[in-house]
Image (tube, helix red, strand yellow):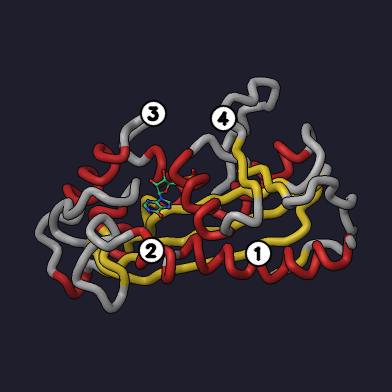
Amino acid sequence: MRPENNESAKPLSSEKPKILLATRNRHKTVEIQMMLGEGVIVSDVTGLAHLPEIEETGVTFEENSKLKAEGISRHVSGIVLADDSGLEVDALGKSPGVYSARYAGPGCTDEANTALVLKKMKGFPDEVRSARFRCVLAVAENGVTLAIFDGTIEGMLAHEVRGKGGFGYDPIFMPEGHQQTFGELSSEIKHTMSHRSRALQQFKDWWTIKLAERC
Ligand code: IMP
C-alpha cells in the first residue's frame, strides 16, 4: 500500500458503507462486490449520465486508475475506487498492458482482443508464453488520491480459448500452479488468487482502518 496523503475523509452516513466504482464494466463491479462481501454496497457509474467519461490517457495502470478515481470523485461525495487492469505478455513486450480493453481496436470485443493475442503468439512454445494479470486500484475523494494498491497474478498463455467463465482474457490465461484457464476455473477459485483480489485485499485492510478512524 502506498498512502498518497493523510487527509481524512468525511464520515459515511449510511449503515452499510458504500463504494462507488469508477467503471462501466459490470464484470469488474460484480467481481469486486463478491470479493468485498455483502457488508458493503458497491455500485458503479453505469447510468450516471451526469458523470464525465474519463479518457484513459495514461501509459501506466497507476496513471489511469488515478485519472479515473480522481476524475469521478470530483463530482460525487464519498470514496471512489478505480481499477485499471490488464494482461502483460512477456513475449509481446508486456502488451497489451494498459491497452488491454482496446487491443484489437476501439470498441472491440473481448473475443477480438483474445483472438489477436493468440494470433500474435501462434507458434510460440510454452517456455516463452509467460504472462501476468495486473490490477492497480486507486482510491480518491474530492479529486484527491488517498491510496494506491497493486495486485499481480503470474501465469501462462494457453494455445487456444478454453472455458466460458470470467471475462476478457480469462479463457486464455492459466494462473501459476494450474493447467486450467481462468475461463475454466470457478469464480471462487479465481477470486482466491486473482490480481484484483490481491489488490482488493490491500484496499480492505486500508479501508478497515479508515472506517475505524471515522467512527
Ligand atoms: P480497463 O477497464 O482499462 O482497466 O481494462 C481492463 C481490461 O483488461 C479488460 O477489458 C480486460 O480485457 C482485461 N482484464 C482486466 N482484468 C481482467 C480479468 O480479471 N480477467 C480477464 N481480463 C481482464
As drawn, 72 above or below 180: above
Quarter occupied by the N terminus: bottom right
SS type, badge 4 = loop
Give the label on residue 107, or none. Answer: 3
**Could you tell whether 67 is left or right of 94 in the image?**
right
Question: Which circle marks residue 203 in the picture?
Answer: 1
Q: Which residue lies under the disc numbered 2?
A: 188
Q: Nearer the viewer, mark 3 or mark 1?
A: 1
Number of dots carrying numbers: 4
Q: CA distance from mark 2 to mark 1?
A: 19 Å
- 63 lies above or below 176: above
Query: What is the crowding at mark 3: few (fewer than 14 residues within 10 Å), some, or many (at least 20)?
Result: few
N-terminal-most mark, 4 or 3: 4
Residue for badge 4: 46
- Sequence-first disc among 3 and 1: 3
Give the amino acid type for the residue marked by disc 1 in the picture: Phe
Q: Secondary structure at mark 2?
A: helix
Q: Mark 2 and mark 4: span between their CA atoms? A: 25 Å
Q: Dots 3 and 2: beta carbons under 8 Å?
A: no
Give the mark, 3 or 2, whose residue is nearer the N terminus. Answer: 3
